[in-house]
Amino acid sequence: MSASFERLIDGIIDALQSHVVPNSNDDFVRGQVFSAIYALNGLKLAADWKAGPLLEQVRLQDDTFAAVKRMADGAAHPEIPATPRLPSDLSDAAAIEALRDDGDRRLGQLLLWASGADARAANRDLATGIEQLLRRAICDQLKIELATTPKSMLQQIAGGDGGAA
């Protein structure tokens, strides 16, 4: 999605949230506005979903793999992929999603290793540091996932939240 398209959608949503919702006392109209905001967020996500959040997650994984590789230098650990894993010309969402999913699997393997008895016996501080790094990376990936998942329209209306994901 282009930055100008994103700004356009964000501007429309902001105008609806700032000017229409606060000045409307009619529940039906407010419901219609929330519906429009939900639809606009869905449009924005659909336009961006092709690659944006997936690319962000793959880059986060690559940064984590590189950091673990530096930290675990010389330690016996599961295979860490070479980074960057993403070719510069790759734009196919399915291929990027497969790369992200493989990265998730490898992060999980590294987390199991770092939290296991063998890694702790070899170097407890190193294993703890790597485990914390991996847990933060997994949480950061979940934040990306949650940020790109729209709240349900009913949740927005019930909570009075005009700011959808």
Image: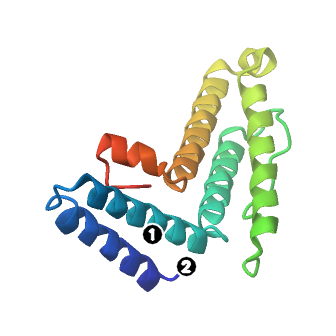
Q: Which part of the image, by quadrant, shows the C terminus? A: bottom left
Of the two numbered discs 1 and 2 in the rendering, the one whose residue sits closer to the viewer: 1
Pinpoint residue 114: horizontal percent, then vertical percent: 72, 27
Residue at (60, 62) in percent of width and height:
53
Residue at (37, 81) in percent of width and height:
8
| Residue 158 position by quadrant | top left
Decide which of tag 1 and tag 2 comes sooner along the chain: 2
Q: Which part of the image, by quadrant, shows the N terminus? A: bottom right
Question: Residue 135 versus residue 67: which sits nearer the camera?
Answer: 135
Residue at (41, 61) in percent of width and height:
35
Q: Which mark is residue 147?
A: none
In 3D space, how far apart are the residues under numbered discs 1 and 2 (Cα atoms)? 14 Å
Which amino acid, by three-letter code, is at mark 2?
Met
Q: Identify the secondary structure beneath mark 1.
A: helix
Q: From the viewer's perspective, is residue 113 above or below residue 67?
A: above
| Residue 59 position by quadrant | bottom right
Question: Residue 55 versus residue 26: which sits nearer the camera?
Answer: 26
Q: From the viewer's perspective, is residue 129 above or below residue 79?
A: above
Which amino acid, by three-letter code, is at mark 1?
Leu
Residue at (65, 40) in percent of width and height:
71
Residue linked to disc 2: 1
Q: Identify the secondary structure beneath mark 2.
A: loop
**Are circles 1 and 2 on residues that touch, CB within 8 Å?**
no
Question: Residue 110 versus residue 57: which sits nearer the camera?
Answer: 57
Pinpoint residue 95: horizontal percent, then vertical percent: 82, 67
Q: Is residue 89 left or right of residue 159?
A: right
Few, some or many residues within 10 Å of mark 2 (<14, 14–19, 20+): some
Pinpoint residue 47: horizontal percent, then vertical percent: 58, 74
Pinpoint residue 92: horizontal percent, then vertical percent: 77, 74
Residue linked to disc 1: 40
